[in-house]
Image (tube, rainbow, N blue to C red):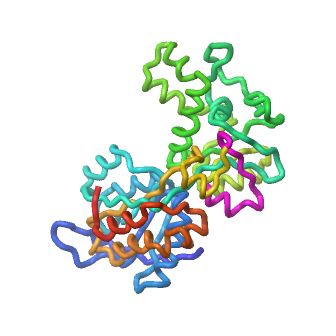
Amino acid sequence: MSFTKVAASALAITAVAGVTHARDNVQVAGSSTVLPYASIVAEAFGENTDFPTPVVESGGSSAGLKRFCEGVGANTIDVANASRAIKSSEIETCASNGVTDIIEVRIGYDGIVFASDIDGQSFAFTPSDWFLALAPKVVVDGALVDNPNTDWAQVNADFASQNILALIPGTKHGTREVFEEKVLLVGCEETGAMQAMIDGGMSEDDAEDACLKVRTDGLSVDIDGDYTETLARLDANKAAVGVFGLAFYENNTNVLQAATMSGVEATTDTIASGEYPVSRPLYFYVKAAHIGVIPGLQEYASFFVSEDMAGPDSPLAEYGLVSDPELEATQESVDAGETM
């Protein structure tokens, strides 16, 4: 999908003085999960309004929010896409740099799927399987030991023999945090590893942090790029298992098959109902100080969450977004410019 980039001027926005000069296009960066949705919206916005097509970049949720919090001005982005909610520490960083009014916009929901080559082994995973595959230390005969598992059959006797190679999102991605909290941490608790750490003298907080760590012997590979890089790595090694967003998977079912998680298939219905255990809301954050200064910013935010773009029968839903049941409330909040 192609987008016209309009050069930003170097003139800064000075919120308190009232600004009349700024660049004439909206600039967006952040989550690779939200990227395809934002790209669809940006192209439609450019085609159906009198405003230039917004510039949409990726980089990951954390990287996007870091750029968002750099300050107020035409040399900073207007919108940060995120596959997780903004952290209190990020809000504090924003405030210290003058970004004090932030509009949080939830666009819908997405699931995280665990996919492998379409012609390979089919998996029915649990969080415990992933913890036993990726943790640096696991419980064996009641003791915490260095992880001896190198084959999925060692992790779960129901799996056929296949070398463990997991392609997981890098730490700058919001998807990684959801994977850690809803898969690794749950698996750590289910296998008894967290309790073993606490019994061994760790505080609960330290044990929780340890549960989120992954092995560093090459069997777990961080992917810092977007899902296309994960897919390319998987194509190069058919035995790998990758972590993807549902929408990306659904647009690549000709080459990928998805595992169930805890007996539940990832679909828009199971995610909307909350039955699928590894799902999350998706967001974008708007710099309120830029509204009325950057042409089209308010209009872009409203356009994004309109029924035509983000409703159940919208282009975003067709691509894979699970429509937010509370979309109308979000629309009202965006139109009113309600800040956090």
User: Of all residues shown, which one is farthest toward the left?
Assistant: 17
Q: Quadrant of the N terminus?
A: bottom right
Foreground residue among 1 and 283: 283
User: Is 7 placed above or below 193 here?
Assistant: below
Q: Is residue 315 visible?
A: yes
User: Is 13 placed above or below 220 here?
Assistant: below
Is 165 on the left or on the right of 31, as rendered? right
The verdict on residue 228 being magenta is no
The verdict on residue 254 being magenta is yes
Q: Residue at x 67, y 24 (%)?
A: 147
- Residue 8: image quadrant is bottom left
Q: Residue at x 44, y 78 (%)?
A: 6
Q: How many marks?
A: 0
**At which x and y percent is residue 156?**
75, 30
**At which x and y percent is residue 322?**
54, 60
Q: Residue at x 49, y 84 (%)?
A: 47
User: Is 232 placed above or below 149 here?
Assistant: below
